[in-house]
Amino acid sequence: MSEDNLSRLYITADKTVLDALKQMDRVAKKLLILVDEESTYQNLISVGDLQRAVINNVPLSAKIAELKIDAKWVCNKSDSFSHIKRTMAKIRCDFMPVVDEHNNVIAIHYWNNVFGGADRYKSKVCKAIPVVIMAGGKGTRLKPISNVLPKPLTPVGERTILEEIIDQFQAVGCDKFHLSVNYKKELIQYFVDGFKSDDYSIDYVCESKPLGTAGSLALLRDKIDNTFFVTNCDILINQNLDEVLGYHRRNCNKITLIAALKHHKLSYGTLKTGDDGVLLALEEKPEFTFKINTGVYLLEPEVFEFLQDDEYMDITDLIETVKNSGGQVGVFPISDKSWMDIGEWPEYIKTVHSLSDDDNFNGLIFN
């Protein structure tokens, strides 16, 4: 393996949390190799390490050296390939570095190269978790295509976005889906019946009128009695959902939102002034990072208590109501490029390009 291919996975402890998240996005991996100034192996840093830091309000500007990172598995030059393969299978790692007696990285074994098309991650915890897909919207931001096709049937490559979403959740063990439909519901059901397999069930929840992203959940109060996912039908995320579920349950959340860390760099310098317009500080083209609601949630069935039958309600209003009543609402962060949105044309085009590039978004939810 060339030094360039190795070094693209290297990161030093003087880099920030934000630097690490951006680098993971660039290399399309959830793991980086922590090295010193001489490129000598020190440890591995995972996206989970970074997510835990963000959840604990560690600033994105904090240095990696400030984080508590447990020692990770690594293989040695003397290890046989069969040992390396068994180790990778045991911990389901994205890749496994091999180091020599001086802690120099001499090789990297990638999951896809070692195991081919085998799933790197197969959830057991998520198996009993039902999924509600909000598929009733008109997709007005995607006109003119939505004049013909409802948003869930928007093509991404040779498949529809709805097929991609179902496959993502099915890959982590989910086998019970509820589709909330309204606009062109007959067409949606016709297409779904055409691609559906016997490995999962689909229940259609038909709104008599638009009820919003939370209002239609009231129609499911007698069908769901445990923790459940809710997702919009125009987004894809690249995240291990077992970790989200673990966070949700450890913190006894009533609702957990998955949030993408979106970066925005101003094209102009900013000025901070004091009394009489005195210049206090100047910052050239500053960059800001915001937590953006991705449209994927985990909810507890207790939220049904806050819903009225046949009453319009957006999920953001439900979240506020639950929060104001004392229910805990948590936020689980994912990196910028771990979220794809097809709701608007520019994002739709980027998503189609990314899905056609195996290196950029391979594996989707749990890679």
Image (tube, rainbow, N blue to C red):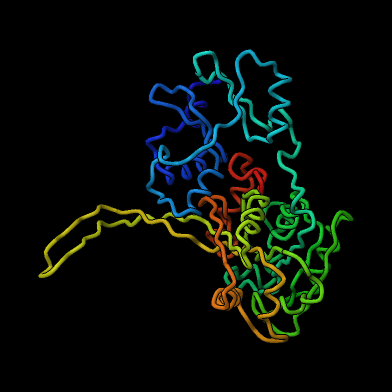
Q: Position of residue 199 (x, y in %)?
A: 86, 54
Count of numbered labels shown in the rendering: 0
Residue 304 sits in quarter: bottom right
Residue at screen point 62% across, 50% down: 239
Q: Position of residue 357 (x, y in %)?
A: 61, 42
**Does residue 288 appear to the left or right of 51 in the view shown?**
left
Residue at screen point 78% across, 69% down: 225
Q: Position of residue 134 (x, y in %)?
A: 69, 69
| Position of the C terminus by quadrant | top right
Residue at screen point 67% across, 86% down: 311
Q: Nearer the viewer, residue 229 or 74?
A: 74
**Does residue 245 appear to the left or right of 278 in the view shown?**
right
Residue 270 sits in quarter: bottom left
**Does residue 344 appear to the left or right of 121 in the view shown?**
left
| Position of the N terminus by quadrant | top right
Q: Position of residue 258 (x, y in %)?
A: 58, 59
| Above or below: residue 294 compared with residue 157 | below
| Above or below: residue 24 compared with residue 181 | above
Name the residue at the right extreme. Answer: 198
